[in-house]
Amino acid sequence: MAMTTRRALTIAVLTLCAAAPSGHAQSVQAPARDASRAPTGTATVSGMVTTDESSPRPLRRVRVALQSADLRAPIATVSDDAGRFVLNGVVAGHYTVMAARPGYVDTILGAESGSFFGAPIAVADGEQVTGLSIRMPRGGVITGTVRYPGGRPAQGMQVQVSQVKSVDGKRRTRFTTAMSMSMATTDDRGVYRQFGLAPGDYVVQLLVMAGPGLLNQAQRQTTSNEASWGDRMASSAAEAWTSPPPAGRLETFAPVYYPGTTDIDAAQVITIKAGEEREGIDVTVESVATARLSGRVFDADGQPRAGVTVRLSGKAGSTLSDIIGALIGRGGRTDADGVFSVEAVPPGEYTLTAQAAPAGETSKPASADAQANIMTMMSGMFGGGNTAGSLYASDAVVVSGQDISNLDLRLRPGVTISGTLVFEGSADRPKGAMQVSLVPVTANANAVGLALSMFQGANASVAPDLTFSMKGVMPNRYRASASLPGMIFGAPLPNATWTLRSIRVGDGPDLADTPFNVEDGRDWTGVTVTLTDKPIVLSGKVLDAQGRPSSAFPIIVFSTNPNHWSPGSRRVQQVRPASDGSYRVPGLPAGEYYIGAVTTLDLEDLFDPLFLQQIVPIAFRITLAEGETRQQDLKLGGR
């Protein structure tokens, strides 16, 4: 059955097989493995690596690895001259098979070229898994020359090659495992060469940290007055001994896309076939005027505040320069008069924030050490809203190449959110650090935006008495989550003992699923984070029309409530059945879900409500109860 809206999508028709009896018993958990040593098993996995051509030939010296979340390190080997590989001592489990060799596309067994979602293999104790066939396409190449405006080669410049797709007429970077966002450096001729590219559509961008990032390259342009003054000084004429004219403005390199635009939607798309080499993708360096931002930070009573952390962050886009600029930013601390400045800021849209401890608490004044200020800047990367103090100020700034002064920021108290962790169950409580986090919710977020949001919210460590309190939370729209050993950002790892059940205030909505607004002057108290050692586990087998195990289709499990179809939702999950058809989805919250199957899946499809809506007409509904272990087999091919 095919449906076409945003992109061609083939949906496999599923039939629910008779389910095993449901219950509320705790699912059986495999024992946690000793992370200090590599486990040794009794199974063997073997196969052959060949080229992906009409007449395949064996590939030697390919690194083949078995990857599993249960393993501290992959089990790996190298193919021999006949392309054969053997992996011994494999422990029973499900594994992703990965292959890599320079000049070829990194390959996952059972996945589309460059895709995250391969078909895992199931391995039993003592089993001899043989006959695996890995076909590796030869990587494509994009190469060209980077030059300065006068034609001089630009040595040491970074060029980013990004795979892209179009959604609703907007171009987005496609995030895959194989060279989806890769960099090359120009040599002394200004030539770059990016190889190992999977077949697909790409854009090429001159990479500068335009965030403003740590690696942003600024240079001061020499004016004609400066040049004339220099000539007079060189002539040693008496009249030349005068004060130098004002220095020229600082400029920085612009993030230019091939053939010469700063807009990703206007960039020329380069389509690469397997093994194809595209030459002449040349880029000319362009400079843009930077600006100096300055201002003062004041307490609520209007007094200048020294030692306040000030940070300028760019918006997250789809390129590496955007990502680093948004994640790291630039800044420092105010001096004794509350004055701050940020130099060499490229044009763009930014957010200027200040964070400080309450009055009376000591904080360091501005440092003259550039490295110290860099560390101050990076302190905001991991939930800095909670670590920098409980006072904040924030303002949007648009930079267009002109200096901006008098950027005054007035500190005010942030919101305090506090509560308690509750463990429901008899298992031993986890030993190690535990945190409660707020993750900003952004409309139409992509994979990069989602990843960044996890580092840009607020967090609080859980005290020994299981209480937590995060201060200085900035007003925004958030989703709550928790992290502890065996779980990260609310998602359980394989063999985790504890999983997140809910985050609520009284009988209110689950804050782990329902985005909520934090507003000025409204503290949140009595937040209860409930964890359980009896997680919901949905598992079973996928069978083809003849009743044979099938691993051909990714399975998507998602809430029947469209309000839960947002980026990062724990109620939208995917799983690729293993070679024996088995699948397992742990940690879903209680509720009603759709189950559907598709032929292909990109990571960002899971963030797309329109994509999920396509699956609804042929999906099946199931209801999962608290603590339930559901064995649900699925059959492909018809109702």
Image (tube, helix red, strand yellow):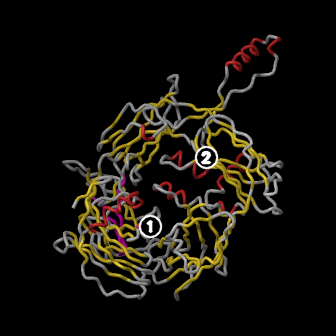
Magenta segment boundaries in residue numbering: 83-100
Residue 522 lies in the magenta stretch? no
Query: Circle 1 sits in a helix, a strand or a loop, which is it?
Result: helix
Front-most of 452 and 402?
A: 402
Give the mark nearer the N terminus: 2 vs 1. Answer: 2
**Residue at horizontal 37%, vertical 88%?**
23
- Crowd rating for badge 2 (residues with CA inside 10 Å; few <14, some 14–19, many 20+): many
Residue in the image at 75% along x and 13% along y: 232
Instruction: Residue 113: give x, y in percent of width and height.
Output: 32, 53
**Residue 505 screen position, x and y as percent:** 59, 77
Amino acid type, mark 2: Tyr
- In the figure, 292 relative to 543: above or below? above
Q: Name the quadrant containing residue 38.
A: bottom left
- Residue of label 1: 563
> Is residue 273 placed above or below 611 in the rendered structure?
above
Amino acid bearing label 1: Asn
Query: In the picture shown, does residue 406 fall above or below 571?
Result: above
**Residue 114: where, in percent of width, then height?**
35, 53
- Dividing the image into 4 quarters, which one contains the N terminus? bottom left
Question: Does 84 lie within the magenta span?
Answer: yes
Examine the rendered structure and indicate whether residue 581 appears above or below residue 144.
below
**Quadrant showing the C terminus:** bottom left
Give the side of residue 29 with respect to residue 6, left or right. Answer: right
Q: Secondary structure at mark 2?
A: strand
Question: Pointer 2: what residue?
Answer: 350
Q: Residue at x 21, y 50 (%)?
A: 56
| Quadrant of res 622 | bottom left
Q: Residues within 10 Å of mark 1 (few under 14, many from 20)?
A: few
Residue 429 is left or right of residue 137, and the answer is right
